[in-house]
Image (cartoon, rainbow, N blue to C red):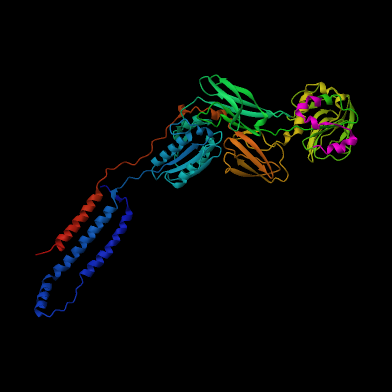
Amino acid sequence: MTSLELASPSALWLLLLAAPIVALHLYRGRLRTIEVPCLALWERLLATQARTSGFRSLRNLLLLLFNLAALAGLVVALGDPRPRTPAVTPHDWALLLDTSLSMRARDCESGDRWSAAVAAVRTFLAALPASDRVLLVSCGTSVRAAGPHPPDSEPLATFVAGLAPGGVEAPLERALALARALLPAAEHPQFIFFSDGAAVSGLAEFVRAPDHGFVCLGSRTDHLALLDVDVDRLWGSPRALAFARARNFGRYPREALLTVRAGERVVSSRKLSFGPGQELTTTLEIPAEVGDRAVVELGDPDFFDEDRRAYLALPPFRRPRVLVVAEREPDPFLVPILGALRNALDADGSGVTRPDGLAQALAAVGPDDVVVYDGVSPSRPLPPGNYLFLGSAGEYLPVRPSTAVEKPVVWRWSVEPGLFRPIAVDSLRIGRSLVAAPGAGERALIECPQGALAVFGQRDKVSYAWLGFRLSDSNFPLLVAFPLFVKGLFAWFAGERDWVFEECYSLGAPIRPRVALPEDASSVTIIDESDPRRRWQVPVIRRGFEFWGADRPGFYRVEAGGLAWRTGVNFASAAESDLAPRKDLAHPPPPLPRAPVTAAEPWRLYLACAAVAALLAEWLLFHRTRE
């Protein structure tokens, strides 16, 4: 026999109406005293009571039972009795959602891949029995989880609504490890991964497991993408150069226009022709009027914009003045060098002075200018600024020369990216030079067995480079390394070292300063300029910090005290830009467990009819008017 259960057990509270029914019945059946003047009437009434007193008691009881039966039938009918559903064994599910940036590709009928993934997750949750438990795990830059909860619980819906694609990878192994840690007691949990398969390591091994499913999103494969963008502003030049690397991920030849924009204005462009799967590298000039930022774009808008646009923060443009201090005429090699750099210098503000006129000349020197001591030594403490010493010594020199060496043999040179490119100077010949030992915060550029022949460093806001010899005492100006050294040194002096951050970072890489921040900076504020509500406060530790929160491309502003810088963050991920969905690995989820369906019977109708029948019988037996 099939057992029944109430779909709405709260209807049983209506049985409390039995109390007023019983109270009314007792009140109606109570005997009342009636005064009448006729004795014959009393005799007739007493005789009737004597004959019917037993039957009347039974009749009153039946009346009460009929009313209670009608009430019970109506209440149970409102409770909607149904056959009891056989119990279903609860299951545990772990749903992994790919939140990498490629899920923003708009190649699905319902919109982008992320919207399709969210819709698939919600459909899956709606189909699960209420007794199951579900764990949701985001698989992206941050791996987070919610649950386990019932499939229709509010925390799961809130968790899904709070996710958004960002980052350049989907760390499936980390997401699986977190899911297994949060479901330790589950017996044979089911794992379902909702993703496009881009930049997912270990996906093939994942789908081989019998309790793993892979729902693949996406439909298109042909795509052009920017893989790398960099910028270089030549020292002393208002123009800058943008270096871009792009790739065709499609199977057919493509043509695209690579442009540089300043706001809405295109300032430079170049047409690129790609073969199937070909990668190209090109250079674009950025004119001076662009300002402090530029955007590089590849081709017309397509279904994935994040890797066809790159953001570049341009270093500041500076043209320093150069003041040469010499006893007589400056070094003959120094004058033509400065003449060759004329376009990169403030020629009108540059000049030559003798030591006796130095005090007056220094009054016009700014913190970005350069002072060259050619064979002479400073006679007073150095004010903040940039200094080049050629064969100098003395009390106020930042470097402490120890001795002089005749014809030193160069045996080591530093490969310093900012000052000394990897070019050999083993052919350097020097007649006579001072040598020094590098101190704290100093680097040796050129060394001989007796010590350093060239040193550079920074101390108390004084930036300096020291050569132990004059240019005319060596063949250094005749070597290929010399113009590169001068260019790098003057660029360092011109302020490139003060450009604290890279011009652009790759998405997923930490934003960190290249040099020490100001001493009074205890924290920095980082603002996403595309959405000023997205801002972060990062503490400064040892005049530096690392920020990992840039999870989408764009310009980011860094504020420390009263100073502010801007940097760009770009997609630059070949693995994520290959948007071909991994349909070959698609593995549908296992069929959901379902309780056997029992044929429904109209129990509610039966009970309602029985209640009506009880009321009809009660009326026929007790309330029908008798003639």
- Res 42 → quadrant: bottom left
The C terminus is located in which quarter? bottom left
The stretch of residues the image draws in magenta is 337-365
Query: Any magenta on residue 345?
Result: yes
**At 42% from the left edge and 32% from the top edge, which residue is drawn?**
588
The mark tally for this picture is 0
In percent of width and height, residue 345 lies at 77, 29
Q: Main secondary structure of the magenta part?
A: helix
Along the line of sight, the residue nearer the viewer: 621 or 173: 621
Compared to residue 412, the image places residue 90 above or below, namely: below
Residue drawn 31% across the image and 55% down it: 11
**Where is 482 relative to 508, above or below?**
above
Q: Is residue 327 magenta?
A: no
Quarter holding residue 346 = top right
Q: Is residue 351 left or right of residue 17?
A: right
Please tell me which residue lies in front, 96 or 260: 260
Q: Is 58 left or right of 431, judged from the image as shown?
A: left
Q: Residue furthest front?
A: 348
Q: Position of residue 294 (x, y in %)?
A: 62, 32
Asked whether residue 39 is in view, the answer is: yes
Looking at the image, which residue is at 17% across and 68% down?
Answer: 57
Residue 245 place in picture, x, y as percent: 61, 25
